[in-house]
Image (cartoon, rainbow, N blue to C red):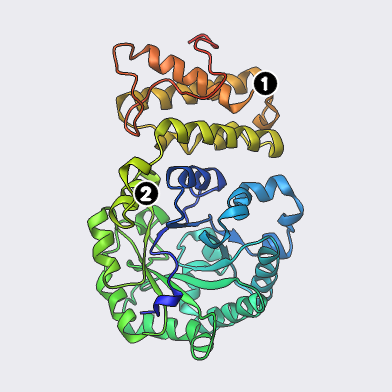
């Protein structure tokens, strides 16, 4: 287990494709504004920086990198990249550090077919020497900066889930950067093996058997390396149990399905008072302001802006809100007479207001108390009921 000086974040939100985009990460920061949880981006291909020069296209960059959060929460943002070539990885880290990123992670755990065809992700675990070369290039690019380099991988690939297989990989990616290093490589171990054939990425998150004991084994064998554990962790008790044995815990699907789980962790793990937990009304008010900014400055699509709110609203009234918000977005798209919804002129907040009004009409007998599990009128300035016919 790593020294206490290395541990900054005890809990992290896992990188998830089509989930942990800048909009979702912003929502999480509003729900939990205390700086307790490390937030990971979706995986970005290193080529996007080394060859595609995504950093020269602000609207496209804003779709992948949480520029807003880097302004005041840079230590808590992890940019995950996929790479099969050390030079591409080096170039990506150079660009990301110049953008203010202070932690870049190499994905060695994604089992999708498309990723395999690019020779990165989980398939890299079968080539530990290449993975080591990529990590070395990333470390070299981060030299003389405050940027930390880490690796996220599985505990095995296909038929091989042996201790020796994982030990060889961990040793390869950490051996050059542990002894005498002021910024050693850390690892996130997903406690399932990856099946590269026969299982979809979704099935790879459920069917392979969890083996948390294998992660604990690596913690014992590599005492100078920082380890986070990931996979099947969905209760505060489970988080606390793992924290007694590893440096940090990464949570994925639980936060995707219920972003308010972070507020539970704030209270149970970090001792935040219930009185200090933001209200759903305040969170929604601030998120709408952010969404309107993203739509105005970067042309972010309504569908992308609305996606995080589908998990935000819960309960019976929440279901009505999700339905109404989807209908409002569809109606706005139809009015635009365009296939590109980034050209719509209506503020995203107007669509949320319309959806809230229509959803409330279906529950007029319900209380007007807003909680994460129910829904009521928003309280931001300018809200007008009945702005759009239901």
Tell me where residue 114 appears, x and y as whole percent.
54, 59
Graded by Cα atoms within 10 Å as few (under 14), some (14 to 19) or many (20 or more), the crowding at tag 2 reads many
Relative to 290, say whether 145 is above or below: below
| Nearer to me, 165 or 271 | 271
| Nearer to me, 214 or 385 | 385
Name the residue: 29% across, 16% down: 366
Which label was assigned to residue 152? none
Relative to 22, say whether 161 is above or below: below
Mark 2 to mark 1 CA distance (whole Å): 37 Å
Relative to 149, say whether 24 is above or below: above
Q: Point out the frontmost of discs 2 and 1.
A: 2
Name the residue: 46% across, 48% down: 33
Determine whether the residue tagged by mark 2 lies in a helix, strand or loop: helix
Q: Is residue 219 left or right of residue 92?
A: left
| Nearer to me, 69 or 175 | 69
Tell me where residue 70 appears, x and y as whole percent.
61, 55
Residue tagged 1: 336
Q: Is residue 362 left or right of residue 96?
A: left
Quadrant location of the N terminus in the rendered image: bottom left
Residue tagged 2: 262
Tell me where residue 365 appears, x and y as whole percent.
29, 12
Determine whether the residue tagged by mark 1 lies in a helix, strand or loop: helix
Tell me where residue 389 appears, x and y as whole percent.
51, 8
Graded by Cα atoms within 10 Å as few (under 14), some (14 to 19) or many (20 or more), the crowding at tag 1 reads some
Task: Give residue 346's quadrant in the image.
Answer: top right
Q: Earlier in the sequence, mark 2 or mark 1?
A: 2
Q: Residue furthest right?
A: 56
Task: Give residue 232's quadrant in the image.
Answer: bottom left
Q: Is residue 363 left or right of residue 328?
A: left
Q: Residue furthest bottom?
A: 180
């Amino acid at each position: 287990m790593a020294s206490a000086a290395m541990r900054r974040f005890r809990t992290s939100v896992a990188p998830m494709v089509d989930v942990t985009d800048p909009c979702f990460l912003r929502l999480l920061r509003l729900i939990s504004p205390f700086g307790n949880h490390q937030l990971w981006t979706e995986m970005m291909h290193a080529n996007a920086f080394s060859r595609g020069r995504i950093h020269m296209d602000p609207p496209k960059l804003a779709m992948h990198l949480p520029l807003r959060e880097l302004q005041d929460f840079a230590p808590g943002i992890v940019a995950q990249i996929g790479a099969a070539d050390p030079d591409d990885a080096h170039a990506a880290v150079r660009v990301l550090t110049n953008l203010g990123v202070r932690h870049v992670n190499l994905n060695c755990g994604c089992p999708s077919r498309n990723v395999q065809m690019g020779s990165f992700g989980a398939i890299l675990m079968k080539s530990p020497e290449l993975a080591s070369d990529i990590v070395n290039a990333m470390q070299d690019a981060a030299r003389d900066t405050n940027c930390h380099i880490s690796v996220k991988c599985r505990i095995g690939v296909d038929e091989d889930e042996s201790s020796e297989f994982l030990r060889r990989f961990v040793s390869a990616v950490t051996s050059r950067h542990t002894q005498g290093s002021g910024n050693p490589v850390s690892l996130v171990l997903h406690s399932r093996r990856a099946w590269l054939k026969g299982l979809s990425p979704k099935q790879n998150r459920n069917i392979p058997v969890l083996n948390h004991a294998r992660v604990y084994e690596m913690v014992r064998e590599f005492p100078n390396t920082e380890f986070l554990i990931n996979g099947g962790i969905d209760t505060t008790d489970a988080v606390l149990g793992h924290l007694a044995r590893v440096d940090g815990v990464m949570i994925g699907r639980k936060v995707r399905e219920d972003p308010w789980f972070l507020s539970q962790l704030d209270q149970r793990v970090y001792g935040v008072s219930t009185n200090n937990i933001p209200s759903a009304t305040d969170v929604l008010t601030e998120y709408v302001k952010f969404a309107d900014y993203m739509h105005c400055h970067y042309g972010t699509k309504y569908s992308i802006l609305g996606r995080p709110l589908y998990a935000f609203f819960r309960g019976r009234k929440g279901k009505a809100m999700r339905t109404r918000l989807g209908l409002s977005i569809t109606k706005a798209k139809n009015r635009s007479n365009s296939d590109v919804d980034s050209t719509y002129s209506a503020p995203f907040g107007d669509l949320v207001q319309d959806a809230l009004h229509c959803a409330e009409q279906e529950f007029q007998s319900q209380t007007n108390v807003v909680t994460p599990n129910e829904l009521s009128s928003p309280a931001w300035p300018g809200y007008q009921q009945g702005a759009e016919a239901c």
